[in-house]
Amino acid sequence: MLVLSATYMSELRPLVDREILRGLLKRTIRFLMEYRHVSPTLIRNAEILTSIHERIFGDVPHIDLSS
Protein backbone atom coordinates (compact mmCIF):
# COMPACT_ATOMS: atom_id res chain seq x y z
CA MET A 1 0.00 0.00 0.00
CA LEU A 2 2.86 2.35 0.72
CA VAL A 3 4.39 1.82 -2.71
CA LEU A 4 1.07 2.28 -4.50
CA SER A 5 0.35 5.42 -2.49
CA ALA A 6 3.81 6.84 -3.15
CA THR A 7 3.43 6.07 -6.85
CA TYR A 8 0.05 7.82 -6.92
CA MET A 9 1.53 10.87 -5.18
CA SER A 10 4.38 11.11 -7.70
CA GLU A 11 4.59 11.98 -11.37
CA LEU A 12 3.73 8.32 -12.00
CA ARG A 13 0.14 8.98 -10.88
CA PRO A 14 -1.38 7.83 -14.21
CA LEU A 15 -0.19 4.30 -13.45
CA VAL A 16 -2.46 3.97 -10.39
CA ASP A 17 -6.25 4.19 -10.69
CA ARG A 18 -7.58 6.56 -8.02
CA GLU A 19 -10.70 4.57 -7.12
CA ILE A 20 -8.87 1.25 -7.02
CA LEU A 21 -6.29 2.79 -4.67
CA ARG A 22 -9.09 4.18 -2.47
CA GLY A 23 -10.72 0.76 -2.26
CA LEU A 24 -7.47 -1.05 -1.53
CA LEU A 25 -6.55 1.39 1.21
CA LYS A 26 -9.97 1.11 2.82
CA ARG A 27 -9.96 -2.70 2.62
CA THR A 28 -6.45 -2.91 4.09
CA ILE A 29 -7.32 -0.53 6.94
CA ARG A 30 -10.47 -2.56 7.67
CA PHE A 31 -8.43 -5.79 7.75
CA LEU A 32 -5.83 -4.30 10.10
CA MET A 33 -8.50 -2.95 12.44
CA GLU A 34 -10.36 -6.24 12.44
CA TYR A 35 -7.28 -7.95 13.89
CA ARG A 36 -6.09 -5.02 16.02
CA HIS A 37 -6.32 -7.14 19.18
CA VAL A 38 -3.49 -9.35 17.89
CA SER A 39 -0.82 -6.65 18.03
CA PRO A 40 -0.50 -2.92 18.68
CA THR A 41 1.54 -2.81 15.47
CA LEU A 42 -1.60 -3.52 13.45
CA ILE A 43 -3.32 -0.51 15.01
CA ARG A 44 -0.34 1.70 14.21
CA ASN A 45 -0.22 0.44 10.62
CA ALA A 46 -3.94 1.20 10.26
CA GLU A 47 -3.32 4.71 11.61
CA ILE A 48 -0.51 5.27 9.10
CA LEU A 49 -2.66 4.10 6.18
CA THR A 50 -5.58 6.22 7.42
CA SER A 51 -3.28 9.25 7.44
CA ILE A 52 -2.15 8.45 3.90
CA HIS A 53 -5.78 8.06 2.80
CA GLU A 54 -6.61 11.44 4.32
CA ARG A 55 -3.63 13.06 2.62
CA ILE A 56 -4.51 11.67 -0.81
CA PHE A 57 -8.31 11.87 -0.74
CA GLY A 58 -8.92 14.64 1.79
CA ASP A 59 -11.12 12.55 4.08
CA VAL A 60 -10.89 9.81 6.67
CA PRO A 61 -12.33 6.54 5.41
CA HIS A 62 -15.37 5.20 7.24
CA ILE A 63 -14.53 1.68 8.35
CA ASP A 64 -17.46 -0.50 9.41
CA LEU A 65 -16.24 -3.34 11.59
CA SER A 66 -19.69 -4.75 12.31
CA SER A 67 -19.71 -7.25 9.45
Image (cartoon, grey):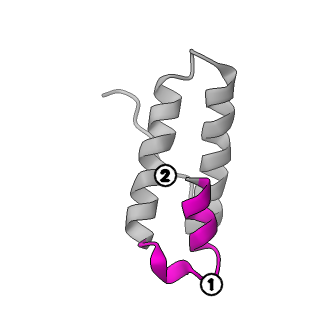
- Which amino acid lies under the numbered mark 2 shown in the image of this protein? Leu
Instruction: Tell me the chief SS of the magenta region.
Output: helix
Question: What's the residue at 68%, 27% (across, down)?
Answer: 41
Find residue 6 and report its horizontal and vertical position in percent.
64, 66
Question: What's the residue at 69%, 34% (across, down)?
Answer: 44
Find residue 43 and report its horizontal and vertical position in percent.
63, 30
Find residue 25 and report its horizontal and vertical position in percent.
49, 52
Residue 28, above or below 25: above
Find residue 66 and report its horizontal and vertical position in percent.
35, 27
Mark 2 vs 1, N-terminal side: 1
Question: What's the residue at 48%, 82% (across, down)?
Answer: 14
Outermost residue toward the left in this view: 67
Which numbered tag is attached to residue 25? 2
Residue 23, above or below 36: below
Judging depth in this view, the residue of 58 and 17 nearest the camera is 17
Q: Secondary structure at mark 2?
A: helix
Residue 56, above or below 49: below
Q: Which residue is mark 1?
A: 11
- Which amino acid lies under the numbered mark 1 shown in the image of this protein? Glu
Judging depth in this view, the residue of 35 and 12 nearest the camera is 12
Residue 35, above or below 8: above
Q: Which residues are magenta?
A: 2-17
Number of numbered discs on residues: 2
- Mark 2 to mark 1: distance in Å? 20 Å
